[in-house]
Image (cartoon, rainbow, N blue to C red):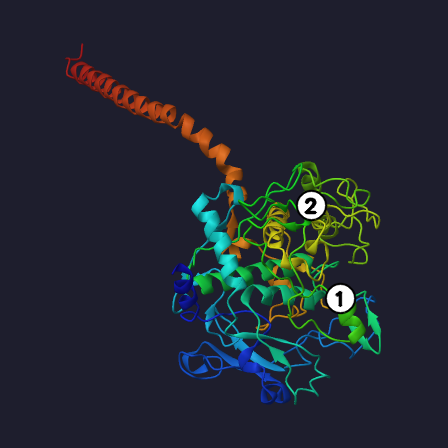
Amino acid sequence: MLLAALCFLLWSFQTSTGHFPRACASSKSLMEKECCPPWRGDGSPCGQLSGRGACQNIVLSNAPRGPQFPFTGVDDRESWPSVFYNRTCHCFGNFMGFNCGNCKFGFWGPNCTEKRLLVRRNIFDLSVPEKNKFLAYLTLAKHTTSPDYVIPTGTYGQMNNGSIPMFKDINIYDLFVWMHYYVSRDTLLGGSQVWKDIDFAHEAPGFLPWHRLFLLLWEQEIQKLTGDENFTIPYWDWRDAKGCDICTNEYMGGQNPANPNLLSPASFFSSWQIICTRLEEYNSRQALCDGSPEGPLLRNPGNHDKARTPRLPSSADVEFCLSLTQYESDSMDKAANFSFRNTLEGFASPLTGIADASQSSMHNALHIYMNGTMSQVQGSANDPIFLLHHTFVDSIFEQWLRRHHPLQEVYPEANAPIGHNRESYMVPFIPLYRNGDFFISSRDLGYDYSNLQESVRPYLEQASRIWPWLTGAAVVGSVLTVVLGGITRLLCQRHKRKQLHEENQPLL
């Protein structure tokens, strides 16, 4: 009954994020290269009649990119989204969405004027009902077809430049799995040739802003699906963990006693099917992942390559990352030294800040440690632990922003790997967002972290303990002030009367 009610709520809200809007997946939209769907509120493109937005030409950055990708015109993701569209909705004020039908992050209400701050919490701080609700929401997303978005099953060239659309329905959870695959897939060069040294969301400056937006959109999609506007993704604080303490049936799934690579049949997620994990097969066919099921979720935590990843990250590792003052450095890729981004991502040592190709630490360590579906970049979002892990990584990014207060200019404007410059639009999102747009505090995007709020709690508790003494001192001080003031006035009056008496004496 609850599931049916939640499914009904899906159609009561407009979604705001994803890859290809269903309304823009026609041959007409593709051949005209325009994605400006009407807003339901007034029926005009981008809600223009209501002042929500307007259909405008896309202005691309011409800043030079790094040397890592030596091709031009061979990948649909280059100069995103110009291969598919050159006109999209430009939303005004606090409005957002592919048709300007939604609010910017942190704003709510019919006119997007209400500002709110949501708090992401440690999953172990959730009550049992809250935790079960989170798991149920993920399951609902896995079994609900996205009403507003579809995925392409072929490249633009395979679609005959848009005249033969190739799109497919997908459920809401897998929509995000597919996006994570698409942003990090290899470039198909024709024949059996591919280019692997390309990734629009990893191994470069955009890693943290891209995943920040990705989580916000995923979070927002679940809010719309369930009607729960207060929903936030919890985080898993893995610092100093001795093992996978969330790998239990109570949380993200225990181990199957009959097969250690599978989840326990008692887990919420044991029946889930994964997608987008057969990369070599796609490459050999020069094809895209089409979202077809590819088997059960795999996970065998701790039985990984311990030479590459000897342990999970420690509190000291995190603190070293936070101490690094440079966001990006050197080549701005996985060879960068003393880069906060590269060290947190896990390509540089959290002891020295020096890039080390033989080790996977920090963020990467968790992926390797899970020893399964989550260990493969393109398909890693299939495992729901991905959400908890990346939410905590984002909290570390937020700590760094608050500690160092960087200007947006700190984010590289040019010469970063393809897709990672400050003004580059992030693949594969429509509506469009730039990397630099998310190099800002989470509080400016409408959310915070409970562990960051708690950082001031000891001072508040200390203040609360001494407050009675401060109050008592204030009362005593007030009483003394009144008493001393009275005594002073009395003495002054006596002195004045004495002077008057002396002035009235006859002169001798």
How crowded pointer 2 is (Cα within 10 Å; few <14, some 14-19, many 20+) is rated as many
Name the residue at the top extreme: 508
Which residue is painted at 45% across and 76% down in the image?
A: 52
The image shows residue 209 at horizontal and vertical percentages of 64, 59
Callout 1: 10 Å neighbours few (<14), some, many (20+)? some
Mark 2 vs mark 1: which is more N-terminal?
A: 1
Camera-nearest residue between 268 and 197? 268
Locate residue 456, reporting x and y percent.
51, 38
Q: Is residue 169 above or below residue 255?
A: below
Horizontally, is 506 left or right of 406 in the view? Answer: left
* Residue 14 on image: x %, y %: 45, 71
Name the residue: 78% across, 78% down.
74
Query: In which quadrant of the rendered view does residue 283 lie?
Result: bottom right
Label 2 and label 1: CA atoms lie apart by: 22 Å
Looking at the image, do the residues carrying marks 2 and 1 touch, with CB atoms under 8 Å apart?
no
Q: SS of the residue at dot 1?
A: helix
Please state if 123 lies on the left or on the right of 401 as rendered.
left
Q: Is residue 328 left or right of residue 431?
A: right
Q: Is residue 72 visible?
A: yes
The structure residue drawn at horizontal position 83% and vertical position 67%, both measured from the top left corner, is 67
Q: Amino acid at mark 1?
A: Leu
- Which residue has dot 1 on it? 279
- Where is residue 168, by image quadrant? bottom right
Write the residue at 49% across / 36% down.
457
What quarter of the picture does the C terminus occupy?
Answer: top left
Q: Considering the image in quadrants, where does the N terminus appear?
A: bottom left
Residue that label 2 marks: 301
**Residue flagged by tag 2: what amino acid is it?**
Pro
Q: Secondary structure at mark 2?
A: loop
Q: Residue 106 versus residue 266: which sits nearer the camera?
A: 266
Q: How many marks?
A: 2
